[in-house]
Image: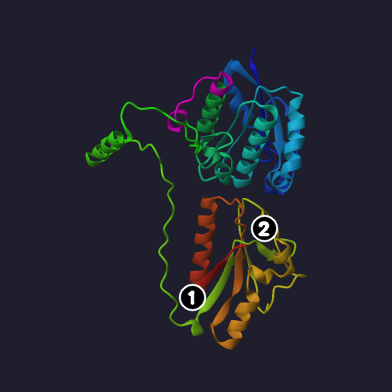
């Protein structure tokens, strides 16, 4: 008898629409939808995709607890043996939803769960300890590679076969350490690795360390009295109504807004789009996150030359590092082209 699998995808991969349909509420359809066709082929005769859950990324992000509970109730009647979500590649909100749903299903139903994501997807950092996440390329171009790897790992979990190391099985290292006994002492293994490194031979460390970017600081501004200062924020301050629909978490874009003649970010015109923290004080006075009022005072007093007439904003909550780097590079290029001297970058 074939294993019963339920598959989770977002509104885009279901063919419903893009960002304009991101508020799509959860629904379940029998059989395969979208990438489920490839999943069905990869699973073969040993497993069957009995149903597909579809949910809009924005809806899930804004209603995580309700969406999770509703979806679990939807899939219970299909009595699944396992649950698979994605692959989400580098789509931040999709990855977060896949991770959250897998974690919820594993907790509530006690069945194997698997997802697939690009390593820089914020869903990886949030959920890698709760589930196995297959490493995928950063876009859907890698679908043919991602789906078979996810199916293979899921089948091993279903059959309760022992799993090898992350590099052997294709899943992202989870940060979970297990005791292992070696014939050689740690000191001997360390010397062996050092000798291999000196000889240019391959070796594998037993404890990988995180890699962080190192950004050398720029020299201080020499002449503040003639400097043009720009404001940029990851605190999500936007004109009221959030005209560019910047997401509350896992932002996929940023906005740039004109503040020519604006002396103060008043509550009737500015709010925050940021999720993940209590925004009460930011909404009461957006200058607490984006200090336009203070910079205007400094402009009047001659402390700075002038405040740049636009500010750029996005949301840092769960936003993928790759997206954040892209935002920064694009914003910086515009500011340099407009002769900005320096930037004050604020957060929540």
The residue nearer to you, when weighing 210 against 17, is 210
Q: How far across and how far down the image is residue 332, in percent?
A: 50, 65
Quarter of the rendering containing residue 82: top right
Q: Which mark is residue 341?
A: 1
The residue nearer to you, when weighing 188 against 165, is 188
Q: Which mark is residue 274?
A: 2
Residue sitting at the far bottom: 301
Could you tell me which secondary element the residue under label 1 belongs to? loop
Is 315 located above or below residue 23 in the figure?
below
Residue 79 part of the magenta-drawn span: no
Quarter of the N terminus within the rendering: top right
Q: Residues within 10 Å of mark 1 (few under 14, many from 20)?
A: some
- CA–CA distance in space, label 1 to label 2: 28 Å
Quarter of the C terminus within the rendering: bottom right
Q: At 63% across and 69% down in the image, what residue appears?
A: 290
Q: How far across and how far down the image is residue 341, in percent?
A: 48, 75
Magenta residues span 156-169
Is 247 located above or below residue 288 in the figure?
above
Could you tell me which secondary element the residue under label 2 belongs to? loop
Q: Which mark is residue 87?
A: none
User: Sequence-wise, which precedes: disc 1 or disc 2?
Assistant: 2
Q: How far across and how far down the image is residue 185, in percent?
A: 31, 32
């Amino acid at each position: 008898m074939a294993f019963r699998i339920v598959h989770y995808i977002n509104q885009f991969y279901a063919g419903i629409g893009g960002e304009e349909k991101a508020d799509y509420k959860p629904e379940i359809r029998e059989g395969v939808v979208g990438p489920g066709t490839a999943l069905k082929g990869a699973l073969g005769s040993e497993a069957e995709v009995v149903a597909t859950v579809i949910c809009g990324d924005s809806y899930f992000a804004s209603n995580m607890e309700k969406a999770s509970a509703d979806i679990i109730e939807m899939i219970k009647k299909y009595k699944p043996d396992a649950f698979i979500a994605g692959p989400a590649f580098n789509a931040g909100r999709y990855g977060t939803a896949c991770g959250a749903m897998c974690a919820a299903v594993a907790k509530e139903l006690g069945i194997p769960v698997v997802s697939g994501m690009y390593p820089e997807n914020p869903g990886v950092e949030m959920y890698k300890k709760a589930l196995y996440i297959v490493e995928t390329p950063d876009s859907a171009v890698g679908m043919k590679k991602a789906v078979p790897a996810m199916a293979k790992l899921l089948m091993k979990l279903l059959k309760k076969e022992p799993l090898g190391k992350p590099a052997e099985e294709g899943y992202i290292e989870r940060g979970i350490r297990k005791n292992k006994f070696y014939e050689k002492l740690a000191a001997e293994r360390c010397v062996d690795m050092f000798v291999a490194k000196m000889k240019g031979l391959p070796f594998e460390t037993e404890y990988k360390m995180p890699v962080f970017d190192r950004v050398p600081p720029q020299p201080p501004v020499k002449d503040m009295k003639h400097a043009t200062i720009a404001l940029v924020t990851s605190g999500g301050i936007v004109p009221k109504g959030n005209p560019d629909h910047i997401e509350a978490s896992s932002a996929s874009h940023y906005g740039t807004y004109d503040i020519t003649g604006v002396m103060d970010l008043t509550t009737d015109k500015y709010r925050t789009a940021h999720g993940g923290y209590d925004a009460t004080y930011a909404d009461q006075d957006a200058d607490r996150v984006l200090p336009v009022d203070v910079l205007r005072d400094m402009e009047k007093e001659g402390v700075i030359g002038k405040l740049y007439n636009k500010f750029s904003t996005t949301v840092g909550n769960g936003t993928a590092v790759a997206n954040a780097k892209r935002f920064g590079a694009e914003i910086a290029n515009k500011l340099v082209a407009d002769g900005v001297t320096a930037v004050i970058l604020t957060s929540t």
